Image (cartoon, rainbow, N blue to C red):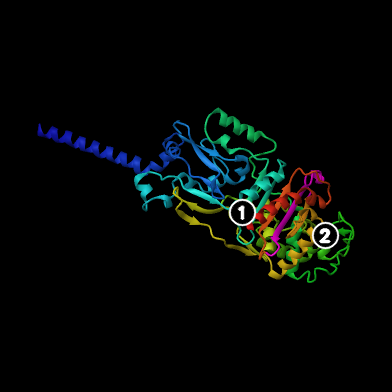
Amino acid sequence: MIRYIRRAAALCLFLLVALLVNAARVQVFEAPSLDADPANRRQSIARYAEPRGNILVDGRSVTGSKDTGQQLRYERTYLQGPLYAPVTGYASQTYGTTLVENAEDDILSGTDPALSPLPFWNEFTRSRQSGGNATTTIKASVQRAAYEGLGGKRGAVAAIEPATGKVLALVSSPSYDPGVLSGTGPAVTGAWARLNGDRAQPMLNRAIRETYPPGSAFKIVTAAAALDAGVVSDVDAPTDTPDPYVLPGTRRVLPNEVPNCGDASLAYAIKWSCNTVMAGLGVAVGQARMVEAVGRFGFNDAGLRIPSRVVKSNFDLAMSGDQLALSSIGQFDTRATPLQMAMVAAAVANGGELRYPYLVDRQTTADNDVLSVTGSRSYAQAMNPATAQQLQQLMVDVVEEGTGTNAAIPGARVGGKTGTAQHGVNNSGTPYAWFISWAQADGAGQPAVAVAVVVEDAAANRADISGGGSAAPIARAVMEAGLREAG
């Protein structure tokens, strides 16, 4: 009898051990995969059980949360959603997160370990804290000036504080209300289908996720390369560039939209935007030195984060002579985001030093205790200080006497460069109108703002001055707002 009891006890012990081993397997080894299983709604329920932290502009929340009373309790809300959508992105219970909502998700959702009262607190308790806040560098008045300036036209604006790299405005048009994607159900899926099916692509962030041929606005980069390389030593001296200019290795003639470009000086070529002079200078600088120069401005950097990801602006690493000539005037395969071209203007304005652009100034707890602050840091010395000083004056001449007079601001020193970028089969598309610029108030120690504007559907002719006609007034309004903020 005792023998059978022992066997039964051994069997029970074996079953208990097996149960414990299986429990350990599930809770320890399989826990991560079970947590990530799409069929497991506990993570989603926990994620939306508390209000999400907020994104702030000028110290005020441009986001919020509403209690739906549903299983996924709190949905994201947006104040002036279309105005700030290119900054915030969306936080959707159905489609996930984008832009700052994505880059700062750990803080906003309360899962970042920095929010925990003790080290490893979240890991031990399997809990989350109240969502923290992300304070942006955006200035509301500058953002609104850019948004209203575009007026619903397809295009984008980026504005930077040259001395720090703070992003003051980031606008993409047309825009959309991210709040329509916040929840779940047919209304959300319908809004998603409608927005994605819109030919105007309102959810495309044209400021940092779209690249355009920069056209003549890129000539500032080529001029910097030529001056730094010693190809040009006197900006007022003839450049020995013929007009007409035959692209190297071809019989194709590069046209100018303005007269008197034959053998023109660099100063004249920037002021009136001579294609032949700038193409010739790019060829004279050479492929290797041009690639090195554009890299210092941020081109070909696939790792740029602000903290949202910025798509790479492109300048080809290997080209034939004719391709290099076209690339040097912002055509061929040269492409740039508006943020990249704002970085070009900012480097000139800041004496040649390019500061790393950033969009989130600091992270705080729900009680506004500071967790981290984003410090200003150098990206690169984009050009020699002497080169930057010369380019500043050349850009001022563009605004005071050349193609960019529509950007002039009384009481401020303004530098700019127009651009018209041709595209499409045989350049059949409506040209993109560009304007890059910076502004410094009279008596101020340094420029307050650098701006890049691109308008896709400008009522533009093919002359370079169209950038001054379509994009320069928008840039002027943005610079005026930036100057008021600095003052």
Res. 176 image quadrant? top right
- The CA distance from mark 2 to mark 1 is 29 Å
Q: Is residue 110 visible?
A: yes
Q: Decide if residue 390 is on the left or right side of residue 74.
A: right
Q: Decide if residue 245 is on the left or right side of residue 361.
A: right
- List the residue tagged with mark 1: 167
Q: Decide if residue 390 is on the left or right side of residue 26.
A: right
Res. 266 image quadrant? bottom right
Q: Position of residue 417 (x, y in %)?
A: 76, 57
- List the residue tagged with mark 2: 401
Q: Decide if residue 44 is on the left or right side of residue 257.
A: left
Q: Position of residue 444 (x, y in %)?
A: 67, 64
Q: Is residue 337 visible?
A: no
Q: Residue at x 76, y 51 (%)?
A: 472
Residues rendered magenta in the picture: 421-443
Mark 2 crowd level (few <14, some 14–19, many ≥20, 10 Å Cα): few
Q: Residue at x 10, y 34 (%)?
A: 2
What amino acid does circle 2 point to?
Answer: Glu
Mark closest to the chain's N terminus, 2 or 1: 1
Q: Is residue 454 magenta?
A: no
The foreground one among 436 and 42 is: 436
Q: Position of residue 258 (x, y in %)?
A: 87, 56
Mark 1 crowd level (few <14, some 14–19, many ≥20, 10 Å Cα): many
Discs 2/1, front: 2
Q: Quadrant of the N terminus?
A: top left
The foreground one among 425 and 449 is: 449
The foreground one among 378 and 411 is: 411
SS for dot 2: helix
Q: Quadrant of the C terminus?
A: bottom right
Res. 155 image quadrant? top right
What amino acid does circle 1 point to?
Answer: Val
